[in-house]
């Protein structure tokens, strides 16, 4: 396995410069949040907002500790429950904020878990003493996830919520169970691909649920990066499984001609990114 | 329409209803940004940050109503503009495939040929999805490529001397598409339109990552997906 360290390092430096620019863009949107929030508070109830809230009220109610999702899901609003929900509908902006905050907390929790997982992988002998491109990818990806965490936590605070600093409660036990079984690079790649796919599809789904524009923008932006992580991991997995680890190198150069045909399609199995692996919006909410 | 598109749209039964019934005109569609250096001329062609005031222009070729996507207001404006980009992508990949078969791009790696076929199929599916949205809302389907970008893309493609040049052009198109969808998402009103745009954005971003790798570059250079290469209506 070979690598042009100088070229790769130059690319990493360039990436970090781009990161600074991107962070500046993201931070520039934060001051808009207060204005948007106030604007939403003063607006009246509209049908779209109520429909949206109806779609998500089960998880909101669960998060508020009052349960009863079955009734809510069927829209059977009677008695005290109906009164309670009617009361919530009377303040749609606040309800939306609760859901938006919950979504951002869950996103933060997935990023915390991703950072921890890549960090753990980098301590494994077969990774830290292995392919330098894989090491660089793990280090760079971990850094990118940490920036995503910061962005989601900032958005959470901007909306008046408590930032989530703990790993995702649903997926942490899965990662904890998997880490002791990691015996080869392919095992790590599989685990990382799973996390990246969950993050991508969770953010895709949540981009449709968010009401806050700035949060939506950040969510879609991060989603576009996590899906690239997943694509690279799928390609790496295919090369490892195909017995061609020597082709995991940057720049690939003339060896691009040696890449198997499948390398041109394995990274994107679907024309449309699905959401079947999306985590629930409340799986990382601060309780 | 591909089977994959059919399956996707079958799982989105409310998309057309929502798109056709929601208030598309409440917000004007705005896409801003610049193209990559290789397509810098398009930037000038597209102008600055403009809000789209006009809808699509419709012409008739034979019995088929065709539309040149010029933007328009609301979600349907985004749909028409996106469809124009997808037509352009499909046409460019088709031209690359034809050139490769004719030996005009030199030796094409097997993975490169597979990429072109796969990406073209994806963009065909994306085009079909947007046209289904438009047709469902009573609008004409878009069958013509984005008029501002096509001449520049054609000129760049004519300069391609090998697969590497074609791959760089493909990457620019994919970056433009992904950035355009990302830029449009905050302005979309319908949840289904957001989901469709985001799901395509993800696919195009993956295309970019693999093209980066094939071109010898780091595959995921950005911490946050950016919109600076987003196309915008004239």
Image: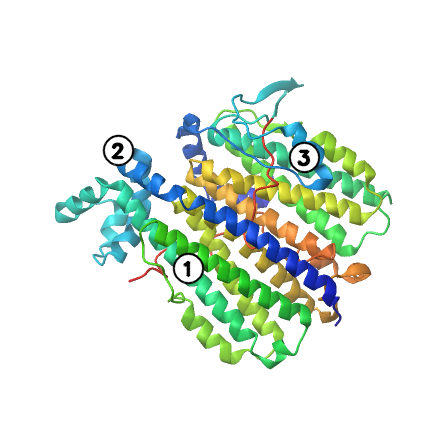
A257 sits to left or right of B202: right
In the picture, the quarter occupied by the N terminus of chain B is top right
- The residue under the point 45% across, 34% down is B16
Q: Secondary structure at mark 2?
A: loop
- Along the line of sight, the residue nearer the viewer: B195 or B41: B41
Coordinates of residue A78 in the picture (x, y in percent):
15, 45
The chain ID associated with circle 2 is A
Task: Please state which of the two labelled residues, at mark 3 or mark 1, is closer to the viewer.
Answer: 1
The tag on residue A108 is: 1
Q: Quadrant of residue B86?
A: top right
Coordinates of residue B158 in the picture (x, y in percent):
81, 36
The tag on residue B88 is: 3
Q: Secondary structure at mark 1?
A: helix
Write down the residue under mark 2: A44
- The residue under the point 50% across, 59% down is A147
In the picture, the quarter occupied by the C terminus of chain B is top right
B18 sits to left or right of A249: left
């Amino acid at each position: 396995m070979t690598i042009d360290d100088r070229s790769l390092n130059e690319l990493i430096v360039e990436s970090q410069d781009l990161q600074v620019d991107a962070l500046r863009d993201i931070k520039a949107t934060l001051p808009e949040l207060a204005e948007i929030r106030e604007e939403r508070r003063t607006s009246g109830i509209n049908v779209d907002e109520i429909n949206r809230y109806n779609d998500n009220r089960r998880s909101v109610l669960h998060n508020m500790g009052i349960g009863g999702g079955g009734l809510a899901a069927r829209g059977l609003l009677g008695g005290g429950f109906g009164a309670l929900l009617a009361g919530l509908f009377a303040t749609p902006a606040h309800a939306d904020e609760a859901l938006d905050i919950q979504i951002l907390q869950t996103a933060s929790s997935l990023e915390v878990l991703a950072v921890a997982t890549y960090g753990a992988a980098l301590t494994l002998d077969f990774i830290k003493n292995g392919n330098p491109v894989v090491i660089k990818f793990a280090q760079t990806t971990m850094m990118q996830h940490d920036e995503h965490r910061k962005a989601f936590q900032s958005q959470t605070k901007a909306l008046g919520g408590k930032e989530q600093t703990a790993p995702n409660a649903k997926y942490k036990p899965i990662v904890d169970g998997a880490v002791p079984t990691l015996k080869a690079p392919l095992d790590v790649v599989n685990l990382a691909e799973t996390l990246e796919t969950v993050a991508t599809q969770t953010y895709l789904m949540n981009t449709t649920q968010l009401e806050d524009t700035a949060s939506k923008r950040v969510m879609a932006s991060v989603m576009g990066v996590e899906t690239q992580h997943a694509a690279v991991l799928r390609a790496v997995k295919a090369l490892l499984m195909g017995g061609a680890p020597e082709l995991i190198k940057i720049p690939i150069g003339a060896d691009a001609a040696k890449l198997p045909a499948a390398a041109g399609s394995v990274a994107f199995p679907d024309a449309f990114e699905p959401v079947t692996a999306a985590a629930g919006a409340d799986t990382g909410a601060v309780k | 329409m591909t089977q994959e598109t059919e399956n996707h749209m079958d799982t989105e039964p409310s998309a057309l209803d929502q798109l056709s019934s929601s208030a598309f005109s409440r917000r004007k569609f705005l896409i801003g940004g610049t193209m990559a250096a290789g397509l810098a001329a398009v930037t000038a062609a597209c102008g600055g940050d403009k809000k789209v005031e006009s809808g699509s222009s419709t012409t008739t070729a034979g019995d088929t109503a065709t539309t040149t996507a010029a933007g328009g207001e609301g979600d349907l404006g985004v749909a028409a503009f996106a469809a124009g980009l997808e037509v352009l992508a499909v046409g460019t990949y088709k031209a690359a495939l034809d050139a490769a078969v004719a030996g005009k791009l030199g030796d094409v790696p097997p993975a490169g040929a597979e990429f072109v076929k796969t990406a073209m199929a994806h963009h065909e599916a994306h085009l079909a999805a947007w046209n289904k949205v438009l047709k469902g809302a009573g609008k004409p389907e878009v069958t013509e490529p984005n008029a501002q970008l096509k001449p520049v893309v054609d000129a760049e493609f004519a300069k391609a001397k090998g697969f590497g040049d074609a791959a760089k052009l493909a990457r620019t198109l994919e970056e433009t598409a992904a950035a355009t969808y990302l830029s449009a998402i905050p302005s979309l009103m319908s949840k289904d339109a957001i989901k469709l745009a985001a799901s395509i954005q993800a696919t195009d971003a993956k295309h970019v990552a693999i093209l980066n790798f094939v071109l010898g570059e780091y595959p995921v250079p950005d911490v946050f997906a950016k919109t600076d290469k987003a196309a915008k209506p004239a």
